[in-house]
Image (spheres, helix red, strand yellow):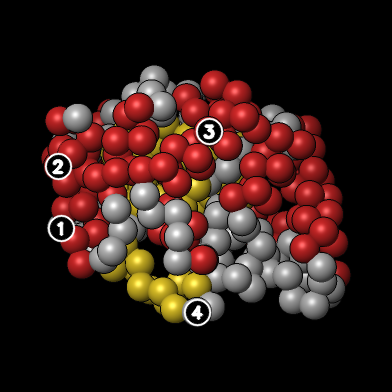
Amino acid sequence: MPSKQLLFGTGGIPRSTKGTSSISGIKRIRELGLDCMELEFVQGVRMGEKGAKNVLETAKKEEVALSVHAPYYINLNSYDEEKLKASLERIYQASRIGSLCGAESIVLHAGFYQKSSKKHTFESVSKALKTLTGQLRDEGIPAILRPETMGKRTQFGTLEEVLALSAEIEGVRPCLDFCHLHAREGKENSYPEFTEILSGVEESLGKEGLSNMHMHIAGVEYGINGEKKHLNLRESDFSYPELMRALKEFKAGGRVILESPVLEQDALMLREIYTEL
């Protein structure tokens, strides 16, 4: 559901969770006073329908909004037909189980350029996502696929690419990972640049694009080829107060998922900064 306000939460269960289950994580999110959590299916979809039903019941009871991060092992630009088929299946299963958990947004890493041109890669990814969104619609699975902006230059996922896919395909919306955008070129780290990004979202997707955003935020260490690793926000050069100011200015709604090593601490810090603006 589109949100008129920003929800803050964690990518995966909070670090301070007692236990390792998604249900424990959801309860901990509520104890912390946060709003949302991303279920990490990054190593594969290992949850069944019964487990998903339990997650849904807990999330409803605790009033915690959920999303899903699909498995990492995906390349929608693979030259190998079997690998492409396996990639589509992984996203499909993440969408199917995720929707049973009550998660609408399914975040995915779309793939790599490899030896393809950027144009050819875009066409391959677009074709694959059209196939998937059609299958999900046919089966009545209410999932929105969210290709993520990526932090390495070898990876498909510039801001322009994910916005173009989202404008072209029904059932596709972007996941804006701001530390990836920053790490890719070492830029995108000031109030004017953040406002330019948000203006681009509005231009491509209209007001609805701004009212139903899905964002990943963390500090990031990066080099000449882009992202190296995530850092805690305070230990990074990322201008997160400026980003919060830009989001407030644009009246952005949706979810802010923290992916820094100290997940919930940074989520609570960001929400406090945002609330006090």
Compared with residue 149, is residue 131 higher up or lower down, i.e. above or below? Answer: above
Q: Which residue is drawn at 69% across and 69% down?
A: 112
- Specify whether 102 is left or right of 24: right
Q: How crowded is mark 3: few (under 14 residues within 10 Å), some or many (20 or more)?
A: some
Which amino acid, mark 1?
A: Ser
Front residue (pair 26, 197): 197
SS label for mark 2 = helix
Residue 276 lies left or right of residue 92; in this view the side is left
Q: Which amino acid does label 4 sit on?
A: Ile
| Label 2–label 4 contact, CB within 8 A | no
Q: Which residue is drawn at 58% across and 43% down?
A: 174
Q: Where's residue 27, x and y in %?
A: 22, 42
Report if the CB atoms under discs 2 and 3 are less than 8 Å apart.
no
Measured in 3D between alpha carbons, the distance from the residue under mark 1 to the one under mark 2, in whole angstroms, is 10 Å
SS category of the residue bearing label 4:
loop
Amino acid carrying mark 3 in the image: Ser
Q: Distance between the residues labelled 1 and 3?
A: 37 Å
Up/down of 51 relative to 207, above or below: below
Which mark's residue is nearer the viewer, 1 or 3? 3
Q: 139 and 15: which one is in front?
A: 15
Quadrant where the C terminus is found in the figure:
top left
Report the Cα–Cα distance between label 2 and label 3: 33 Å
Say which element carries label 1. Answer: loop
| Residue 207, x across and y down, in percent | 54, 21
Whichever of callouts 1 and 3 sits on the residue coming sooner in the sequence is 1
- State the count of labels: 4
Q: Name the residue under label 1.
A: 16
Task: Kindly identify which numbered label has been placed on residue 224.
Answer: 4
> Which mark's residue is nearer the viewer, 1 or 4?
4
